[in-house]
Amino acid sequence: MHKALKTQKNWTAEVGKKSNALDLEKGVFTWQDPEKIAQSLKQSAETSRRRKAKPFQSAMSMLNFYINRSGKNLNNIQRNILEQAKSELRKLFFSRKLSLGRRAKRNTEEH
């Protein structure tokens, strides 16, 4: 194997194991429940003191990184679960903000 390719493979494996931004629960990307995965990523992102981006961006980036780097080794069932976890992550971070925004808009329209 070409040395640069081998080094890159080792690097991506290390990032997955030892994220510099989030302390992930063990095996989080192998879980079967998208909502549980999203909740775990959200908690990790919100409690991390080492992340450089906002919590949502850090959590989504880690999820995308795992999906993209797993490639052919990720079976379709788990890939679908992780894709659903993206939607759950968006709901966890933004559903409350959206509902509060709609409520505020209605209140200003009524007055």
Image (cartoon, helix red, strand yellow):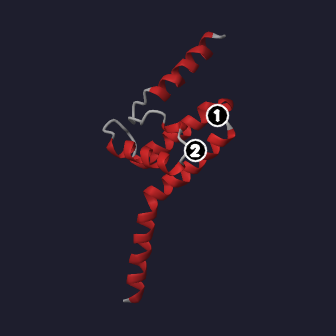
Q: Which residue is mark 1?
A: 74
Task: Work out which quarter of the rendered image holds the C terminus and state it.
Answer: bottom left
Q: What's the mark number on residue 12?
A: none
Identify the mark at residue 82; answer none if there is no mark. Answer: 2
Residue occupying the point 64% across, 34% down: 74
Quadrant of the rendered image containing residue 48: top left
Please, what is the three-letter code of the amino acid marked with disc 2? Answer: Leu
Residue type at mark 1?
Answer: Leu
Looking at the image, tell me whether mark 2 or mark 1 is earlier in sequence order.
Answer: 1
Residue at image location 61% in from the left, 31% down from the top: 70
- Residue visible at 64% across and 46% down? 80
Which quadrant would residue 93 be assigned to in this image? bottom left
Q: Position of residue 34 (x, y in %)?
A: 54, 49
| Horizontal relation, residue 57 to residue 71: left or right | left
Query: Residue 75, image x and y in percent?
Result: 67, 36
Examine the rendered structure and indicate whether residue 95 appears above or below residue 108.
Answer: above
**For the residues marked 2 and 1, what is the alpha-carbon distance in whole angstroms?**
10 Å
Residue at x 61%, y 35% (from the top left corner): 68
Q: Are marks 2 and 1 in contact (CB under 8 Å)?
A: yes
Task: Give the crowd class for mark 2: few <14, some 14-19, many >=20 residues within 10 Å.
Answer: many
Label tally: 2
Q: Secondary structure at mark 2?
A: helix
Q: Position of residue 54 (x, y in %)?
A: 39, 47
User: Splitting the image into 4 quarters, where does residue 1 fall?
Assistant: top right
